[in-house]
Each structure stands twice: as structure tokens, then as C-alpha cells.
Image: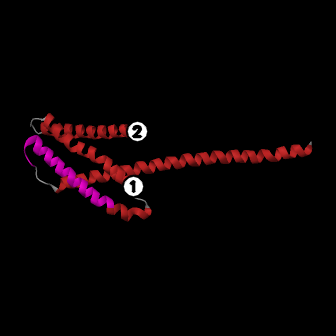
Amino acid sequence: MRRRVAVALLVFLAWTVLAGFFAASTSLTYISQGRPGLWSRTLAIELAEWWIWAALTPLVLWVSRRVTFHRRGIPLALMVHVPLGLLLASLAVEAESSMRVWLFGVRPYLLISNLARHVLICWALVALTDALDRYGRSRARAAEAEARLGQAQVQLLRAQLQPHFLFNALNT
């Protein structure tokens, strides 16, 4: 349970840092163009946008761990992850649009680039989950191989010692 809370806090913190980065970037772009930075508004928009993904991340992780991209499972994984990515991206775009209406009273245009960006975010989460899981499995295999190597060395030493004991016993 503690691990899940720690992971949830880490996910929330990561999305918050990303929102802060994009808010600073957007505000600095406004300032460089001679316009006011609008720090609070920009931060509110970015936090709303990226916290949506903080809320969607557990679902993406859950599905990614159950439907993986292994050799024989690629068609199934594509049949699951492509519609899921489109669905979650659509939800994120709609939630972001609703947040903008709530914050500013203006509904933005539905841009395909926004939808594509959110699909890419979803797929990046899937890829990151897959990479972390593969890394964890490779570490487990390496630890298992190291343990087997240790057992083989012990068995080799035993095999080398046993003839000496037998020879010494026969000699006496």
C-alpha cells in the first residue's frame, strides 16, 4: 500500500513539474513578444491540462501491464492500445476544453494537433511502462543467473573436494 501511495505521489509530482515547465515556457514566450506574462493564468491552464494526465496515468499503466507488446501479442496490443489512446486523448481534449471554459468562459477550437499531442502522450506512457517493465524483468533474470552461477560454483567445489576425501579415506 505504501508503494502505491509513493508511486501516486511521484506520478502527481512528475506531471506537476511538467506543467510548471510548460507554464514558464509559455509565459516567457509571451514576455519575449512584449505581452504580459500572465503567470497565474498560464499556470492554471497547464496544471489543468497535465493533471488530467495525472488522473489518466493509472489507467494507462494498468492496461499497459496487462496487454504488453511481446512478439506474439503485438496485434492484440495494437487492437487495445490504439483505440485506448484515441479514447483517452479525446477525453483529455474535452476535459481541457471544459477547464478553459470554466477558467476563462471561452471554448477553444478543437484542433487535430491537440488530439495528436494527447495520443502521443498516451503512447509515451505505454512505451515508458513497457521499458520499465522490461528493465525490471532483465534485472530479475540477471539476479537469478547470478544465483545459479553461485550454486554451480559451490557444486563444482564439492565435486572437487569429494574425490580427495575418498582417496584419503582409502589411503588410511
Q: Residue furthest front?
A: 1
Helix, strand or loop for disc 2: helix
Q: Position of residue 29 (x, y in %)?
A: 16, 40
Of 101 and 36, nearer the camera is: 101
In this picture, is 30 found above or below 112?
above
> Which mark is on residue 162?
none
Q: Position of residue 108 (x, y in %)?
A: 10, 49
Is residue 87 on the magenta stretch? Answer: yes
Is residue 90 on the magenta stretch? Answer: yes
Residue behind mark 2 = 3
- What residue type is disc 2 on? Arg
Residue at point 27%, 50% (across, down)? 121
Residue at point 7%, 43% (across, down)? 105
Alpha carbon distance from label 2 to label 1? 19 Å
Relative horizontal placement of residue 150, taking residue 28 as reference (left or right): right
State which quadrant residue 23 falls in.
Answer: top left
Relative horizontal placement of residue 137, taking residue 56 as reference (left or right): right
Region in magenta: 80-107
Total labels drawn: 2
Residue at point 26%, 46% (across, down)? 53
Q: Residue furthest left?
A: 105
Helix, strand or loop for disc 1: helix
Density class for disc 1 (Cα within 10 Å; few <14, some 14-19, many ≥20) is few
**Which quadrant of the rendered structure holds the N terminus?**
top left
> Which mark is on residue 66?
1
- What residue type is disc 1 on? Arg
Which comes sooner in the sequence, label 2 or label 1?
A: 2
State which quadrant residue 85 falls in.
Answer: bottom left
Q: Position of residue 131 (x, y in %)?
A: 40, 50
The colour scheme used to paint the residues is secondary structure
Q: Position of residue 5 (x, y in %)?
A: 36, 38
Q: Residue furthest right?
A: 172
